[in-house]
Image (cartoon, rainbow, N blue to C red):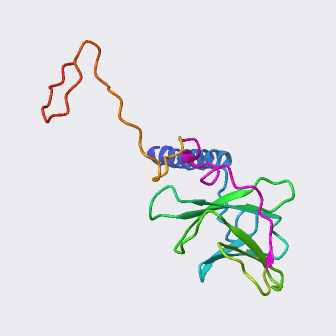
């Protein structure tokens, strides 16, 4: 009699686990890594070359708009925030590309239509000539991070070029503020 009870317990545990897992995943939005296997079906390659950032979007004709802005809020860690718009009225998918090339905020965009398999765009701080034609970027993304990232709701971090404001006196009511002459006051709670 114990054996059928264990079988029933195991079967019910498996079914409840499956239903719990399905309900959790049904509520989560799938993050599109833009590797060709996500919900958009698009693949994006970002390549650095000679001080430029080149973007390849597969298949050709997929990209309807590109937006970009430089995130240089942390010294020595520049990141390009790129918005990819695949439909005419779609919101752009925001992604971040860590940079190894020295970019400045004044970006120029170019396109090369000679590739037959993918859309080829370039971001640069200089004028590209030859097969490259000027490309008009969409307005810069309002957010710094991909959708769903908690840092989008956080207050914007100050730039390193800004001087921090002087600390405010945070003494408790009825107590003198501590002097800054090396003495420590004990805490009375």
> How many marks are shown on the rendered structure?
0
From what the image shows, is residue 114 above or below residue 63? below
Per the image, is 152 magenta? yes
Describe residue 181's horizontal placement relative to residue 17 as left or right: left
From what the image shows, is residue 151 above or below residue 118? above
Residue 83, horizontal then vertical, whole percent: 70, 60
Magenta segment, prevailing SS (helix, strand or loop): loop
Residue 98, horizontal then vertical, whole percent: 54, 67
- Residue at 81% x, 54% y: name it: 90
Q: Quadrant of residue 51?
A: bottom right
Magenta-highlighted residues: 133-154
Q: Quadrant of residue 108?
A: bottom right
Give the camera-side residue of 85 and 184.
184
- Residue at 67% x, 66% y: name it: 107
Per the image, is 186 magenta? no
- Residue at 80% x, 65% y: name it: 136
Give the camera-side residue of 5 and 112.
112
Q: Quadrant of residue 40?
A: bottom right
Q: In the displayed image of the protein, which residue is found farthest to the left? A: 183
Q: In the displayed image of the protein, which residue is found farthest to the top? A: 174
Residue 8, horizontal then vertical, whole percent: 54, 45
Quarter holding the C terminus is: top left
Residue 181, horizontal then vertical, whole percent: 15, 34
From what the image shows, is residue 100 above or below residue 117? above
Describe residue 133's horizontal placement relative to residue 149 as left or right: right
Give the camera-side residue of 171 and 141.
171
């Amino acid at each position: 009699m114990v054996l059928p009870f264990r079988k029933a317990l195991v079967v019910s545990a498996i079914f409840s686990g499956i239903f719990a897992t399905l309900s959790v995943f049904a509520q989560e939005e799938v993050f599109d890594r833009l590797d060709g296997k996500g919900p958009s079906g698009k693949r994006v390659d970002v390549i650095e070359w000679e001080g430029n950032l080149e973007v390849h979007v597969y298949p050709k004709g997929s990209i309807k708009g590109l937006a970009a802005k430089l995130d240089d809020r942390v010294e020595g860690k520049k990141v390009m925030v790129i918005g990819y718009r695949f439909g005419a009225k779609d919101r752009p998918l925001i992604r971040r590309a860590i940079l190894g090339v020295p970019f400045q905020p004044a970006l120029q965009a170019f396109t090369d239509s000679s590739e037959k398999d993918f859309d080829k765009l370039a971001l640069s701080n200089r004028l590209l000539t030859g097969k490259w034609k000027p490309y008009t970027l969409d307005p810069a993304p309002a957010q710094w991070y991909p959708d769903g990232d908690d840092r989008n709701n956080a207050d914007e971090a100050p730039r390193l070029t800004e001087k921090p404001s002087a600390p405010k006196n945070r003494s408790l009511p009825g107590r003198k503020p501590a002097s800054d002459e090396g003495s420590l006051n004990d805490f009375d709670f």
